[in-house]
Image (spheres, rainbow, N blue to C red):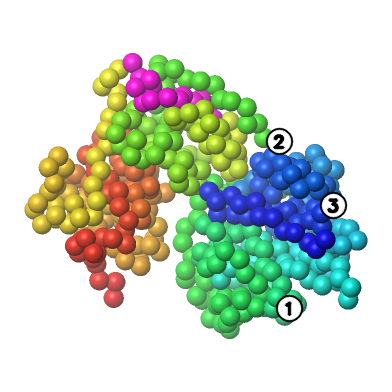
Amino acid sequence: MSVEVSVIATSSLGDRSYLASDGQVAIVVDPQRDIDRILYLAGAKGVRITHVVETHIHNDYVSGGLELARITGARYLVAAADEVDFDRMPVADGDTMPVSDNLRLRVVATPGHTFHHLSYVLDEATDGGWQPAGVFTGGSLLFGTTGRTDLLGQEHAHELAHHQHASARRLADLLPDGAQVWPTHGFGSFCSASQADAPDSTIGREKQANEVLRLAADEFVTQTLAGLDAYPAYYAHMGVANQAGPAPLDLTPVTRADAAQLRDRIAAGEWVVDLRHRKAYAASHLAGTVSLGLDGPMSTWLGWLIEWGTPITLLAETPEQVADAQRELVRIGIDRPAAQATGAAERWTTEPGQLRELRMADFPALAAARTGNTPAGLPAPDVVLDVRMTNEWRAGRVEGAVHIPLPDLPKRLADVPVGAVWVHCGSGYRATAAASLLANAGREVVVIDDRFDRAEAAGVAMADNA
């Protein structure tokens, strides 16, 4: 049979892993740490994993490659130039790796996202010889964009951006237009310079759509570096973990906390995270908790907001939701939450005064309030706080709003002007997280639970970006 490439998506982190097979043996590319998903898929397809490959030492998640190779007995391919603390099969530019009579991998050096980044061309056997089916590009050539070049430090970003441009050109020259492009990043990952513009792509499409293949090197470098926003603070720990060789994960159930223990953890300054949807959180929640619902990129924001190593307790409606959160957290190296509790919020305290509500509004309500017609039950907005990222703020903002990106807020609570705060983001998810932090600091707060792109139509005055 011809090659079959299956996508294992991790939408919460914006990444993809791949399982490519000929019906008998399989290659796994850039596996996430929770490898049970990959083992299940291989079992369902009846294929044996013989090769696990890493395009680079990842900065946005803890890899499952070492453990997957250990369990399956597969060869583990990692760039020879990367210094790691475990045994692997070192590979470099120009190496060819036979996989089966039907498949082989060709290693292509594509520095840019990192200095030692590799791409892997997947060739399949045909009557006319070997033909490239596609290329696993990791953080090099993405769908309509490229991987960011500043993760190893701003001092390297310019040089790596030039490498990124040359690497993309090399792949475009090396492969036919019909070859598939299979990137790891670009689907919401902060490893991507910008968001993917398609669900799949080919070399030919990228030649038409991707500016790395349309712009001269200097123009691409200038444009790429100018567009980079902040990236999660926990990235600082991912590369270190991946170079050392991640330990096997533990997804067994977490210790249950009773009401008294939850109260003590909150009092001690630990993070107690409410995983329920923000509307459930707004209706009733335990005072001192932080809202990061499982319906959004919980692990990204939690890993970005906390001081690394702070104990985390998870609150959810069901044990299954806690288990889902555990899985997300181990992917970024938060191995064991300190405790958990499930059920209704009323079960998490024996003190009725500890349950709190969070008021919500929308942009029409803000427009009315700013003209003196504040809806009943809501305080007039003394402050409009925008917690979106800097690039979002630059693209359009509410007139008179104060801007503090959500990741900066824990250390900048004192910078929020006095008075009642109406807080917004792009949808309501980050605004609710921010509002919970503000409420914990004793502030009067209203969440604008609405899409930002509806603000102007709702009558909210917007700032002139000219």
Q: Give the CA distance from mark 3 to mark 1.
A: 27 Å
Q: Is residue 279 visible?
A: yes
Q: Is residue 342 magenta?
A: yes
Q: Give the CA distance from mark 3 to mark 2.
A: 27 Å
Q: Amino acid at mark 2?
A: Pro
For marks 2 and 1, the one nearer the N-term is 1
Would you identify the image quadrant in which residue 347 lies?
top left
For label 1, the residue is: 176
Quadrant into which the C terminus falls: bottom left
Q: Secondary structure at mark 1?
A: loop
Judge whether 75 appears above or below 131 on screen: above
Tell me if label 3 and label 1 are in contact, CB under 8 Å.
no
Quadrant into which the N terminus falls: bottom right
Would you identify the image quadrant in which residue 165 lies?
bottom right
Q: Residue furthest left?
A: 372
Q: Residues within 10 Å of mark 2 (few under 14, many from 20)?
A: some
For marks 3 and 2, the one nearer the N-term is 3
For label 3, the residue is: 24
Q: Residue at x 44, y 29 (%)?
A: 317
- The one of 175 and 420 positioned closer to us in this rendering: 175
For label 2, the residue is: 248
Q: Nearer the viewer, mark 3 or mark 1?
A: 3
Would you identify the image quadrant in which residue 94 lies?
bottom right
